[in-house]
Structures are given as structure tokens and as C-alpha cells.
Image (spheres, helix red, strand yellow):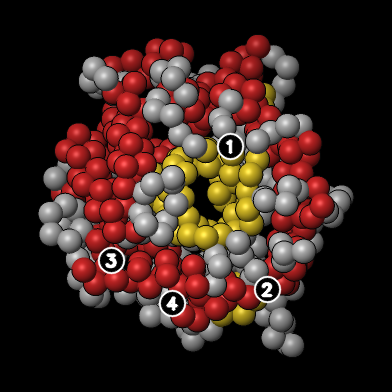
Amino acid sequence: MTTTLKLEISSPHRSNFPKDFIWGTATAAYQLEGAALEDGRSASIWDTFSHTPGKVKGGDTGDVACDHYHLLERDLDLMKQFNLAAYRFSVSWSRILPQGRGAVNAKGLEFYDRLVDGLLERNITPWVTLYHWDLPQTLEDAGGWASRDTVAAYLEYTDVLSKHLGDRVKHWITHNEPWCAAFLGNLMGIHAPGNRDLKTALQVSHHLLLSHGLAVPILHQNSVDAQVGITLNLGPTYAFTDSSEDATAARTSDGFMNRWFLDPLYGKGYPQDMLEIYGAASPVIVAGDMEAIAVETDFLGINYYTRANVKHKAGAGLFESEQVHVEGEYTFFDWEVYPQGLTDLLKRVTYDYDPPAIYITENGATYQDEVGEDGEINDTSRLNYFKLHLEACSNSIKAEVPLKGYFAWSLMDNFEWAEGYEKRFGLTYVDFTTLERKMKASGKWYSDFIKPE
């Protein structure tokens, strides 16, 4: 079903963005590539999880996904058609080091060679995310991210990949959304590997941050003059009322979602209020860890989708709070459309943490797309969503936020993790039977908006 946003739409103006502002789209390996067990790739935790009955809607898996692995040239031409200046993608660790470490899979490296070279031939700058949740299953079997040994394995993977691609890739993201990997995957159990344990989740979060900090100097060493950062999924948290109880609930929610990762990355250590709440479940920290995590980076990537409205509720879990479903516009994911939250978030991050540069590394929406009788996909709500959020970006720049680029999520419909193929985020429609790609109305608008003047 196609719906139209009722929010007042103010079309953004390209002239409000700097001439050197970076425009791109983003994807992730497991959501897109397919070829799950081809050319030496081993299983990741998402292969295992998606093949476990009841874990993914419809029993869907990423075995084929968009078959990007085999349709690479077609997709590269699509990116050129989009007028992209940059393309953010992640690398499948299991394709490079099938055992997680040790022997390197040459065919895996060859695929990313073709991808990177194909981008450069089309004057599209590659932005590489090293880890987008798809840990090799062999490492999970040995303890996963809860084990400090996985940090060492990640550094080996980082070294191999950056030595191989570092002559051509100059923009690196160590991790995508460590909050999701830690808490959706190890506390709530709704993402791979499916654990439900607070202490495990917190230890995972610490090791993800530690691996980031230790990887940054490796990336700089192997990729001369590279820009290196990390991507966090962040969202502003608002108290539902002016009561002190709701204010405390909102502060705690912010600690869980935002400050737990931002504070240590910017040298403030883990938030004391959260350590007190977590108590004995808090992570084990070795001397030197916090200094390593706080390594200087070149930018912060932010993925923004929605905000949180929070109120106090006695006895409601560890935080004694709950999110409130306020009246407003919502996406098919039941996420509130709230572009002001993006401006609020960017201003707050700038003021509290002063990153040298910020990039929106994901922003987008899922709606129930329909192919019209004329074959077109008139996804007006998604198009308007992008207009609203680009206007929010423009307002942030006016407020002196060091926002340097924007990557729409996503280049095309793909495997949406636990939601399978039901939730479509793409600027391009994918028929998952024929694998045909067709640009939606939102994609046509975006490609026109970002076209070089």
C-alpha cells in the first residue's frame, strides 16, 4: 500500500549544501551479495541465524539476496546512473578469511578488487565498512565478540584487507552500529547470534569498541592519507512529560542508546550512571583499553532513522521506562518520521563531542511499495521522507554542524535482517524472483538532486 506523508514538506535546495558535500548510497554485504557459499566464502553468524527456523520472517535468508556478487557490473552501472559521488559498502569477513583468521581467500579479495576498481572507473569513491554484523561462524563458535581473541582476529582481518585495498580505498569505517551487534544480537536475541544475556552484550560492546580503537592506526598505516571513522546508530531521546521521573528515564535511555558508545569514543569513558545500573554485568576492562578506544578519528558516521519518546514506568525492566507511541507519521517499520530529531541530534553531538567531521552514513525509510500498472514505483512517502531529512541536514549545516556528506539507505531493496524481504528500504525496487532492478520515484528524485551542477 502506498501512503503519503501528511507532514509539511519543504523541498531542500542543493545550493544550501557545500560544493564539496559528498552524496552517496549505502549497502551491506550480507544484505546484498548472495553467493553465500561460493568461491571459498564460509558461513557467517547471519547464515546460521537466518537458517534457524523462526529467526527471520518468512524463513528468508541471504543465500541469494540481490545476487550482487554475480550482477556486479549491472549494479555498478546503476550506481553511475544514480550520479553517486561515493558508495558505502561492507566487506564479508567470511569471504576474505573463511576461518576468521589465517589463510586468505584470493577469490574473495578478487571480488572486492573488481568492485573497487569498477567504482573508481566510474568516478565513484569507495567507502569501505569493515564490519557490518557478519562475524565468521567459526569465530562465534570460539566465543564470538564476547571473547577478546575475536578482537585479535578482527585486527588480522583489518590488516589483510587494508593492505590489499589501501592503495585505492581512502575512506574506512571500522564498524557499523555496534549497538545493534551488541544489544540486538546478544541481549534481545533478535539479531545474530541470538544471545539473550546482558553481561555478554556489554562485553561484546566493549570488544567492538576496543577493536575499533586498535584498528584505526592499522588502517592509517596501510592506507596512506586515509580518512578513518566509525558509524553509530544514534537517536535523540525525549522525555514524554516534564516530570523528573520521565527526565531520568530519558537520560537513561540516552545512556543506553547513545552515550554508552559516544562517551568512550571521545575520551569520557563509559557513563558512570550506566555503570551503576549495569553493576556486576559491566564489561571487563583491561588497562589501556579506554585509551585505545579514544583514539583520534577523522570523522563520525551517524545512522539516523527516528527518535525515542520515553516515560518512567516502575518495574519495566532494567531501566524502569518505556517508549511511548506518540501521534504522528510512521513508516512501515513503525518508526516515527521526525526530521527535527536529526537536526537536534547533529547539534547535540557537535556540542558535546566536537568530532572533526560528521557524515550521515545511513538515512531512509521502508514503505509498502507497489508496482503500478505502468511498471513504475511511485513511492511518494519515501521521496518526501528524503526531502524532509535533507532539509534537516541543511538546517544543521546552517547551525555550524561539520556535516560533510550524506549516504541514503539504501541503493536497492535487500535482505532486511530479521524482517527478511518484507521491509523495503531501496531507492531501487528489486523483484526478488527475477532480480530485476528498477529505480523508484524516490531514486529518480535523489539521482537528479545530487547530479553535479
- In percent of width and height, residue 117 lies at 42, 70
- Report which residue position mark 2 lands on: 440
Q: Amino acid at mark 2?
A: Lys
Q: Quadrant of the N terminus?
A: bottom right
Residue 129 vs 300, above or below: the answer is below
- The span from disc 4 to disc 2 (Cα, nearest Å) is 20 Å
N-terminal label among 4 and 2: 4
Q: Amino acid at mark 1?
A: Ala
- The span from disc 3 to disc 1 (Cα, nearest Å) is 30 Å
N-terminal label among 3 and 4: 4
Which circle marks residue 357 in the picture?
A: 1
Q: Nearer the viewer, residue 319 or 223?
A: 223
- The span from disc 3 to disc 4 (Cα, nearest Å) is 14 Å
Q: Residues within 10 Å of mark 2 (few under 14, many from 20)?
A: many
- Report which residue position mark 4 lands on: 72
Corner quadrant of residue 77: bottom right
